[in-house]
Image (tube, rainbow, N blue to C red):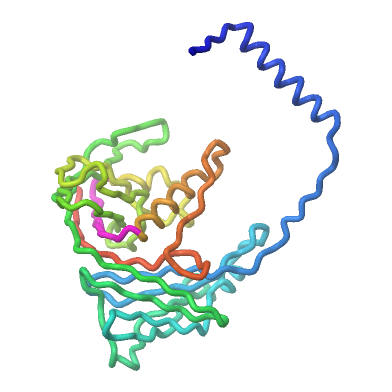
């Protein structure tokens, strides 16, 4: 049965909502909610790609009401962990290093122990890699695969597909053509570098449930950037005459795809009261957060003249 609503019915419904709201307010009681605190959780940011050794950053979560400053961030790095990566034949124990950044701040990471190269290996396509982290008496594991790269056919620039009042003049959008392999279950994440700078993850991760085995023209790409250090993000999402851009096109497995897909959905819905809450899905065991990612990488560079 189809129901119809006239103007009087809608007004009556709105009035009923107001009556209910005011009746609830008239009998309100003070409520105290103790959010408490939870112990820090391990966060893993690890990757291995074809032709490169593994690279892992370990940190812990920060309390929701904590003061975030450089000292707080320095204290989140996890030191003294036992970190190993196995390719099924060899097991490599990683060493902790530090990298100076701003002032006295440092970034800590785990990678190849240059003093012990007996079990050294680099990533190979179609191989699986197991990460094991032992920290504070707990063991965390994850397995990832480096899929065979499926290269982009071409990349080029054109006018932005969508513009608004914040779109800078002379801005150019990055596009690409892609031939998806004719096997189902291909997943892609991409990163970009502008003018030989660092590679930053762009807001895009793909699966081939719809495009399996087809040739896709003019895929719209965003240019990644360090959004924590740049307030003027609208201009940095585009390219301009004279820019050189390199896209790092990465084939990934389903677990890595799920992490990036949920991460980007959660990131884009921050501050939106109508967005559906979502937890970022990790592929690390024992309750750890983050990702252990295998990347089958392919690079393509374009200089805009």
Above or below — where is 281 with respect to 210? below
Residues rendered magenta in the picture: 240-254
Q: Quadrant of residue 157?
A: top left
**What's the residue at 28%, 93% (across, down)?**
118
**What's the residue at 25%, 59% (across, down)?**
251
Q: Quadrant of residue 87?
A: bottom left
Q: Is residue 305 visible?
A: no
Q: Is residue 292 magenta?
A: no
Main SS class of the magenta portion in the image: strand
**What's the residue at 35%, 75% (across, down)?**
130
Q: Is residue 244 magenta?
A: yes
Residue 146, given in percent of the width and then of the height, sits at 26, 67
Residue 300, given in percent of the width and then of the height, sits at 19, 57
Residue 26, given in percent of the width and then of the height, sits at 85, 28
Q: In the displayed structure, does residue 250 sit left or right of residue 292?
A: left
Front one among 193 and 42: 42
Q: How many marks can you see?
A: 0
Residue 103, given in percent of the width and then of the height, sits at 52, 73
Above or below — where is 204 with respect to 104? above
Q: Is residue 256 visible?
A: yes
**What's the residue at 53%, 74% (across, down)?**
77
Q: In the displayed structure, does residue 203 sit left or right of residue 49?
A: right
Front one among 128 and 171: 128
Front one among 109 and 225: 109
Above or below — where is 219 with respect to 112? above
């Amino acid at each position: 049965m189809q129901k119809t609503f006239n103007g009087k019915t809608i007004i009556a419904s709105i009035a009923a909502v107001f009556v209910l709201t005011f009746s609830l307010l008239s009998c309100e009681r003070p409520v105290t909610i103790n959010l408490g605190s939870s112990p820090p959780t391990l966060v893993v940011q690890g990757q291995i790609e074809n032709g490169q050794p593994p690279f892992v950053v370990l940190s812990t979560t920060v309390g929701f009401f904590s003061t975030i400053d450089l000292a707080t961030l320095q204290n989140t790095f996890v030191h003294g962990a036992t970190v190993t990566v196995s390719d099924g034949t060899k097991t490599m124990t990683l060493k902790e290093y530090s990298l100076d950044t701003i002032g006295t701040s440092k970034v800590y990471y785990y990678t190849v122990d240059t003093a012990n190269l007996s079990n050294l290996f680099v990533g190979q396509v179609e191989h699986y890699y197991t990460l094991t982290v032992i920290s504070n008496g707990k063991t965390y594991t994850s397995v990832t695969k480096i899929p065979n790269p499926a290269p982009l056919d071409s990349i080029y620039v054109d006018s932005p597909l969508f513009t608004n009042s914040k779109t800078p003049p002379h801005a150019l959008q990055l596009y690409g053509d892609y031939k998806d392999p004719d096997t189902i279950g291909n997943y892609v994440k991409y990163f970009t570098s502008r003018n030989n700078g660092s590679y930053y993850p762009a807001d895009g991760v793909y699966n081939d449930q719809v495009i399996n085995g087809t040739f896709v023209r003019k895929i719209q790409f965003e240019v990644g950037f360090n959004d924590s250090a740049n307030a003027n993000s609208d201009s940095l999402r585009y390219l301009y005459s004279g820019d050189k851009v390199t896209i790092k096109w990465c084939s990934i497995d389903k677990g890595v795809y799920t992490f990036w897909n949920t991460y980007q959905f959660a990131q884009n819905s921050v501050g939106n009261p109508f967005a559906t809450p979502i937890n970022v899905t990790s592929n690390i065991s024992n309750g750890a957060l983050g990702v252990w990612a295998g990347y089958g990488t392919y690079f393509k560079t374009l200089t805009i003249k």
